[in-house]
Image (spheres, helix red, strand yellow):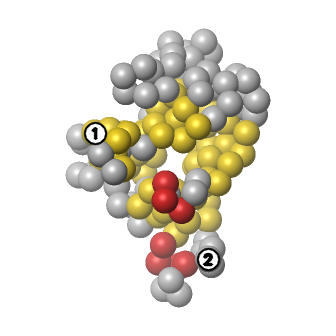
Amino acid sequence: MSVGITSWRKCTILNGASLSDAIWMQGYLLLAMRQAANTAGTAFTFQASYDGGTTFEDLQTDSAELSITKSATVAQHFYLPDAKRVFGPTHIKVRTGTSGSASAQSADVVVWVCLEDVEAANGG
């Protein structure tokens, strides 16, 4: 795998919420994530928009919600497995927990996502 130009973008999940603000990612591939130790929940799931950020829907893979297992007590930096890398939406929102069982935060938390410029990765 060759890695092109990457950039880190931050999103915030507010106190009492489980869903972040929207991250613009058109033309990028979601490669990795970084979380603080106080990020509640044991999974990240995502909402995605394909219309410029107006309408968001749960991001699915193989008829199931795309879910990334995480620690609820340890700061982590992790790469997404190839099968779970996200490409295509114009925007995503990061959720702690799942759509059916979201994990509300007890303080504002910042989650960082690492995006790869797909055009640059392909020599463009």
Between 18 and 83, the one lying in front of the other is: 83
Residue 19, numbered label: none
Residue ID for mark 2: 1
**Callout 1 secondary element:** strand
Q: Residue furthest bottom?
A: 123
Q: Which residue appears at 73% of the width and 24% of the height?
A: 73
Q: Which residue appears at 62% of the width and 65% of the height?
A: 6
Please state which amino acid type lies under the numbered disc 2. Met
Residue 57, numbered label: 1
**Callout 2 secondary element:** loop
Residue 53 is at least partly visible in this image: no
Between the C-alphas of marks 1 and 2, the distance is 30 Å
Between 24 and 118, the one lying in front of the other is: 118
**Crowding near the residue tagged with mark 1, few <14, some 14–19, many ≥20 C-alpha atoms within 10 Å:** few
Q: Nearer the viewer, mark 1 or mark 2?
A: 2
Please state which amino acid type lies under the numbered disc 1. Glu
Q: Position of residue 28 (x, y in %)?
A: 47, 64
Q: Position of residue 70 (x, y in %)?
A: 63, 35
Q: Position of residue 93 (x, y in %)?
A: 42, 39
In the shown orientation, is residue 81 left or right of residue 47? Answer: right
The quarter in which the N terminus is drawn is bottom right
Residue 25 is at least partly visible in this image: yes
